[in-house]
Image: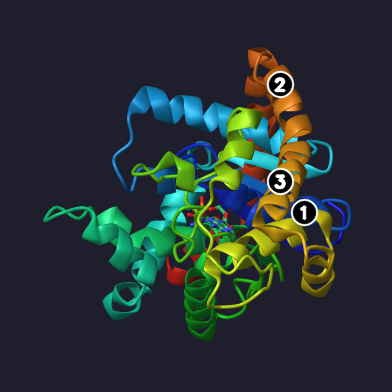
Amino acid sequence: MENKKIIFSGMQPSGIPTLGNYLGAFKNWLDFQDKYNCIYFIADMHAITVRQEPAKLRKNIKELFALYLAIGLDLDKSIIYVQSSVPAHAELSWILNCYTYMGELSRMTQFKDKSQKQGNNIPTGLFTYPVLQASDILLYQTDLVPVGEDQRQHIELVRDIAIRFNNLYGDIFKIPDMYIGKVGAKVMGLQNPTKKMSKSETDNKNNTIYLLDDLNLISNKIKRSVTDSDNEVRYSEDKPGIKNLISIYSAITKKSIDEIEKEFMYSGYGNFKSAVAEVCVEEIRPIQQRFNEIIKDKAFLEQSMKEGYEKANNMANKTLFKVKRKIGMI
Ligand code: TYM
């Protein structure tokens, strides 16, 4: 690999990716691809922290891999692989569990949210999830992790764990920075714009735009989104629905908030929603076309996963062996 900065990020195959995943993560991943050494993985070991149906998980992994390619990630430029194929993630995760404190993990807001939905039987993996995330990132000597706003706390913890480990054993891990985009880093639900749009949403499908939704459905979901009654296209905290639509429009068109407010000052919500719907549909249409081609080619997908595994496995083992030696393992 050329001597460029290393970018590392990933997504859970816990459902079809959403417009939030696209604007908060995918779009930034693409921007990094030409200038840096990028590694993008499929976080299937993270996905099993909540119960998954095996056949569906397998399908989700393949579809997510195909989607990575359909959005424009390029196997000649980036390493793309499936987490569970590289054993070093699990191994380093165990080791780092011994360097992470219960108090730190208890403070993670994602754990608090997700564990509430699990009743009395909260899987331990849900609790130690951020340690696995630390292992992912630290195995590859990552410089920069592009994520959405909801991952900020996890990446901060990854840095803390790495610094703690380095203080004990020398410069083993690169301390990663995070990259969170200015727009699109937190896309909210269309029906409930005070909560983030999530791919594991089960209650109300109209709340979420899935990248593989029928294009008409995408348009309708946006047109039916919850707004307010003052009919003024203005970016404001007390107008969460409109604020969210402006952010989405801005992230896709790259127009500034000011420009958008001016453009739609007199147009009312109906016209504005139609404009947002149109840019979303036109952004997603070519992705779906490419996806439909790629997903058909099973042999190509399998071969690509294998190549990704080989490259990632080599890199990850280098760090893992260093860690094991340093802590006294043979
Ligand atoms: P996941 O699968 O929940 O989400 C993948 C990426 O999408 C971003 N994202 C959003 N961005 C904007 N608006 C939203 N509504 C929205 N929802 C999700 C997330 O911030 C993320 O960047 N723990 C990670 C997966 C992971 C990982 C890693 C990421 C495991 N190890 C190492 C980076 C580095 C997760 O659950 O992402």
Tag 2–tag 3 contact (CB < 8 Å): no
For the point 75% across and 42% down, the residue is 278
Q: How many residues crowd around disc 3 within 10 Å: few (fewer than 14), some, or many (20 or more)?
A: some
**Cβ–Cβ below 8 Å for labels 3 and 1?**
no
- Mark carried by residue 274: 3
Amino acid type, label 3: Ser
14 displayed left or right of 246: left
In the image, 216: left or right of 162?
Answer: right
Residue 155 location (% of width, % of height): 53, 71
Label 1, secondary structure: give it. Answer: helix
Disc 2: CA contacts within 10 A as few (<14), some (14-19) or many (>=20): some
The residue identified by callout 2 is 294
**Separation of disc 3 and disc 1 at Cα?**
14 Å
Nearest the viewer among 45 and 59 is 59
Frontmost of labels 3 and 1 is 3
Q: Inspect the image, locate mark 2, and give the three-letter code of the amino acid beneath it.
A: Ile
- Going by the numbered disc 1, the residue's amino acid type is Ile
Q: Of circles 1 and 2, which is in front?
A: 1
Return the disc, 3 or 1, that comes first in the chain's sequence.
1
How crowded is the residue under tag 1: few (<14 C-alpha within 10 Å), some, or many (20+)? some
Q: Which residue does the image show at 49% across and 62% down from the upper left?
A: 193
Q: Which of the two labelled residues, at mark 1 and mark 2, occupies the earlier sequence position?
A: 1
Residue tagged by mark 1?
Answer: 252
* Left or right: 118 in relation to 67: left
Position in image of residue 229 (x %, y %)? 53, 65
Task: Determine the image quadrant of residue 23.
Answer: bottom right
Name the element at disc 3: helix
Q: How far apart are marks 2 and 3 (CA)?
A: 30 Å
Is residue 222 shown above or below 102?
above
